[in-house]
């Protein structure tokens, strides 16, 4: 049985980077600014803030909606700046979270249970079920690093901050996030998966890449 300690959501960094890297094969943004934007919303946790502001999440009582970004709210504020690679990367992060929590996770995490890789269904609350999901991120880090041939220089070279302002996160504190994520990646170890296998996550990344790339190309026509 999994030891149920609260996992670190930030370990999903490799999913965000994999999606951003695949998208950038088509849209050709300045890579480091784009990838930095694609992890930037998670700075909120590192500086003791809740994710509602950084992730444009509406304050509603429905627990099934509490992790889902409101993409329209982001676009109402920043659509005119989507030509900046950092802002575009930020949008990719939010869009990836939107698809992850709205469509992918509910296939496994139900209102009062979670379905494991072996087909077993455990009666668990949403919060307890998510601890199994977060546990899987650590193992996925290693597998995604290999599968997508990640360049992690962003985390180990001097950080150049983007020349952009946002109300939702303090841009001048992004080094805190980069340092933390570098540690998470370095400390990832091979372990058992409980909920997802690599094939399922790669399919999510493929579908997400296709959907977001199509959306970005349409928006770029209007800029």
Image: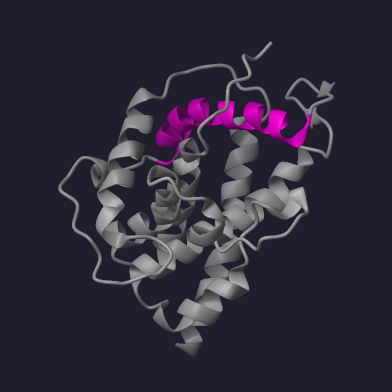
Instruction: Tell whether 125 sits left or right of 96.
Output: right
Q: Is residue 109 magenta?
A: no
Rendered location of residue 158, percent (x, y): 15, 48
Rendered location of residue 145, percent (x, y): 41, 35
Predominant SS along the magenta part: helix
Rendered location of residue 148, percent (x, y): 43, 41
Rendered location of residue 192, percent (x, y): 58, 17
The N terminus sits in image quarter: top right
**Colour mapping used in the image:** one colour
Residue 91 visible in the picture = yes
Of 19 and 121, the residue lying toward us: 121
The C terminus sits in image quarter: bottom left
Question: Which residue is situated farthest in the top direction here?
Answer: 1
Position of residue 80 relative to residue 160, above or below, is below
Give the image quarter of residue 193. Answer: top right
Residue occupying image coordinates x 52% and y 17%: 191
Position of residue 166 relative to residue 139, above or below, is below
> What residue span does the magenta drawing correspond to?
125-148
Residue occupying image coordinates x 84% and y 34%: 112
Of 188 and 61, the residue lying toward us: 61
Instruction: Tell whether 86 sits left or right of 200.
Output: left
Residue 28 visible in the picture = no
Q: Is residue 145 magenta?
A: yes
Residue occupying image coordinates x 68% and y 28%: 195
């Amino acid at each position: 049985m999994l030891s149920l300690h609260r996992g670190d959501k930030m370990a999903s960094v490799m999913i965000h980077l994999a999606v951003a890297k695949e998208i950038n094969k088509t849209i050709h943004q300045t890579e480091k600014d784009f990838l930095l934007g694609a992890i930037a919303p998670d700075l909120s946790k590192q500086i003791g803030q809740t994710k509602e502001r950084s992730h444009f999440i509406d304050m509603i009582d429905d627990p099934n909606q509490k992790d889902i970004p409101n993409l329209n709210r982001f676009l109402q504020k920043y659509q005119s700046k989507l030509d900046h690679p950092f802002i575009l990367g930020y949008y990719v992060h939010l869009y990836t979270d939107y698809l992850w929590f709205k469509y992918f996770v509910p296939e496994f995490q139900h209102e009062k249970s979670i379905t494991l890789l072996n087909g077993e269904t455990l009666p668990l609350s949403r919060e307890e079920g998510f601890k199994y999901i977060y546990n899987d991120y650590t193992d996925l880090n290693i597998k995604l690093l290999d599968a997508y041939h990640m360049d992690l220089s962003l985390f180990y070279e001097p950080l150049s901050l983007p020349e952009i302002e946002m109300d939702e996160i303090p841009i001048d504190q992004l080094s805190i996030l980069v340092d933390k994520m570098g540690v998470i990646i370095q400390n990832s170890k091979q372990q058992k998966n409980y909920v997802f296998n690599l094939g399922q996550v790669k399919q999510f990344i493929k579908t997400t890449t296709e959907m977001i790339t199509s959306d970005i190309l349409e928006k770029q026509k209007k800029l």
